[in-house]
């Protein structure tokens, strides 16, 4: 380790970037985050603010390029648009790490950096999650889903508790490397702490017993290439194929049927013929369905406005709609379409650059069971999931379409994010992906059923019902807010106090 720490700062930043980026891949390398920050910490603790910004930014570029490379394989747009989106996203996300490094440089002679750094990185992730460019997908907790017992406290502290833990371990390890303390004694202490956390987490996992009630849900994973789905020449064939899968789902006699995002190549609310066909089958079978669909309205100015929506059809009832609340910038809308409008008329034969987000945290009801729907990217955002649970949802459905991303790491990461939402809110999650990964996740994060990527499947699973909700569901990011306050007290406010 000492040999590595003697390398130039740019090399140390690259080493850390490689370690952390690789931890996000579906290769079970999550343990790398417990040592991967050490080279970067060494650089930050020993250099000026300007140098730290450069090394932090380089680290952020490498780490985000590796962890988010799947943005660059999106088949839903021209290569130039996809490439620009990837580079822009990586450049933007790297800024947070450059700023964090600069902050360390500013305070390195006046505060205890070992104490301040973990709280600073929590603040980085928390601030990064806000606004239209909010990005919680990259939170460090995503690297830890192989270690379920370690995740059990996120129902209190959220994913930011894992971030504090991970950075603290890196800081402690770096301190012992620097002071040459007996590594055997230190290793024993760390091992005891880890074992204690695993045992307590495992114990908490045993406490979640379901109620006597359950619901049988059939999930449809059609494995249809989304580019072909929206090819008009394939439209009738696709509708017939989806109808055949729907018939299979009905034959399983579930209580409910879940389709994936934008399941049919049509506007269900506007297409009376197709919607009526679905409604007749719902009425005949007595089984409600939730179907992902694109929707369109004409605004007061006469412009077409599009929504990424879900339609809920029940026997002998009027349909209900949910409009996706948090859209993906540069994929579902352009931030400034009047200036830069690359998404106009791509693939879906609609102007994707002007999609609008909804504002209704809808809770659907069937036979006294309340459930809500997260559409695709929304499942990466903790605050949206917890809002649905606070509104009364007992089950979270996720409709996704990761078919644009092929066999990249994106669909795998997306599924793991659903496990985090289940634990945070102590609620079962049912996921339907167009090309996968579909499955059922229990409130402990345990996967009850999982259908691999790139497989056509229709399956039924019994979902046990629980008393949903948690401290996190009720109070949200109190822990992150507390970390922000602590950072201010031991950093900026302490320095201001010294001036007076």
Image (cartoon, rainbow, N blue to C red):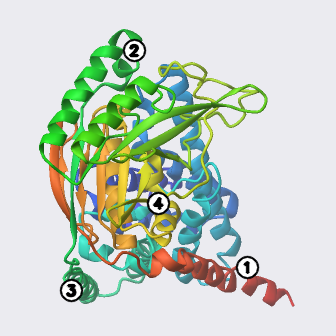
Q: Pick whichever of labels 4 and 2 is earlier in the sequence.
A: 2
Nearest to the eye among marks 3 and 1: give it: 3
Query: Badge 2: few (under 14), some or many (20 or more) residues near its Cα, within 10 Å?
Result: some
Q: Residue at x 49, y 33 (%)?
A: 269
**Residue 492 numbered tag:** 1
Q: Pick whichever of labels 3 and 4 is earlier in the sequence.
A: 3
Q: Residue at x 41, y 83 (%)?
A: 179
Residue 449, quarter of picture: bottom left
Residue 285, quarter of picture: top left
Query: Badge 4: few (under 14), some or many (20 or more) residues near its Cα, within 10 Å?
Result: some
Q: CA distance from mark 3 to mark 2?
A: 51 Å
Q: Which residue is mark 2?
A: 231
Q: CA distance from mark 1 to mark 4?
A: 43 Å
**Residue 269 numbered tag:** none
**Residue 203 numbered tag:** 3
User: Taking 373 as reference, is 427 left or right?
Assistant: left
Query: Badge 3: few (under 14), some or many (20 or more) residues near its Cα, within 10 Å?
Result: few
Residue at the outermost top position: 233
From the viewer's side, name the closer residue of 20 and 135.
Answer: 135
Task: Say which element carries label 2.
Answer: loop
Q: Could you tell me residue 490's position as x and y percent? A: 65, 85
Q: Residue at x 37, y 37 (%)?
A: 401
Task: Say which element carries label 4.
Answer: loop
Q: CA distance from mark 2 to mark 1?
A: 56 Å
Q: Which residue is mark 4?
A: 363
Nearest to the eye among marks 1 and 4: give it: 4
Nearest to the eye among marks 3 and 4: give it: 4
Q: Pick whichever of labels 2 and 1 is earlier in the sequence.
A: 2
Q: Pick whichever of labels 3 and 2 is earlier in the sequence.
A: 3
């Amino acid at each position: 380790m000492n040999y590595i720490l003697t390398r130039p700062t740019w090399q140390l930043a690259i080493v850390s970037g490689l370690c952390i980026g690789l931890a996000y891949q579906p290769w079970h390398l999550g343990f790398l985050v417990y040592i991967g920050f050490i080279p970067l910490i060494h650089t930050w603790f020993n250099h000026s603010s300007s140098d730290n910004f450069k090394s932090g930014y380089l680290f952020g570029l490498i780490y985000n390029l590796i962890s988010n490379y799947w943005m660059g394989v999106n088949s839903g747009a021209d290569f130039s648009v996809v490439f620009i989106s990837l580079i822009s996203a990586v450049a933007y996300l790297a800024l947070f790490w450059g700023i964090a490094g600069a902050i360390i440089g500013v305070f390195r002679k006046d505060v205890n950096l070992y104490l301040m750094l973990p709280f600073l990185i929590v603040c980085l992730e928390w601030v990064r999650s806000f606004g239209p460019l909010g990005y919680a997908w990259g939170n460090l907790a995503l690297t830890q889903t192989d270690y379920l017992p370690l995740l059990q406290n996120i129902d209190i502290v959220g994913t930011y508790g894992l971030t504090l833990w991970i950075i603290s371990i890196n800081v402690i390890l770096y301190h012992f490397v620097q002071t040459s303390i007996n590594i055997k004694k230190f290793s024993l202490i760390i091992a005891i702490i880890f074992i204690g956390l695993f045992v307590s987490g495992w114990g908490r996992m045993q406490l979640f017993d379901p109620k006597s009630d359950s619901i049988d849900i059939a999930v449809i994973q059609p494995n249809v290439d989304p580019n072909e789905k929206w090819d008009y020449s394939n439209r009738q064939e696709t509708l017939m194929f989806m109808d055949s899968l729907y018939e299979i789902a009905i034959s399983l006699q579930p209580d409910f049927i879940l389709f994936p995002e934008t399941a049919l190549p049509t506007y269900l609310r506007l297409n009376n013929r197709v919607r009526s066909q679905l409604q007749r089958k719902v009425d005949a079978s007595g089984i409600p369905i939730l179907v992902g669909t694109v929707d369109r309205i004409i605004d007061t100015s006469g412009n077409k406005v599009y929504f990424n929506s879900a339609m809920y059809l029940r026997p002998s009832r009027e349909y209900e709609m949910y409009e996706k609340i948090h859209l993906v910038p540069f994929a579902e809308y352009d931030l400034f379409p009047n200036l830069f409008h690359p998404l106009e008329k791509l693939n879906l034969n609609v102007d994707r650059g002007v999609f609008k987000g909804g504002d209704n945290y809808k809770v659907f009801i069937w036979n006294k069971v309340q459930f809500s729907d997260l559409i695709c990217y929304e499942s990466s955002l903790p605050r949206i999931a917890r809002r649905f649970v606070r509104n009364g949802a007992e089950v979270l459905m996720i409709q996704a379409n990761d078919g644009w991303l092929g066999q990249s790491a994106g669909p795998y990461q997306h599924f793991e994010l659903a496990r985090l939402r289940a634990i945070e809110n102590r609620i079962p999650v049912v996921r339907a992906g167009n090309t996968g990964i579909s499955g059922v996740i229990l409130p402990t994060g345990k996967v009850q059923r999982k259908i691999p990527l790139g497989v056509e499947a229709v399956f039924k699973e019994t979902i046990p019902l629980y008393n949903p909700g948690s401290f996190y569901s009720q109070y949200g990011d109190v822990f992150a807010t507390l970390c922000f306050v602590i950072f201010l007290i031991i950093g900026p406010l302490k320095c201001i106090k010294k001036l007076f």
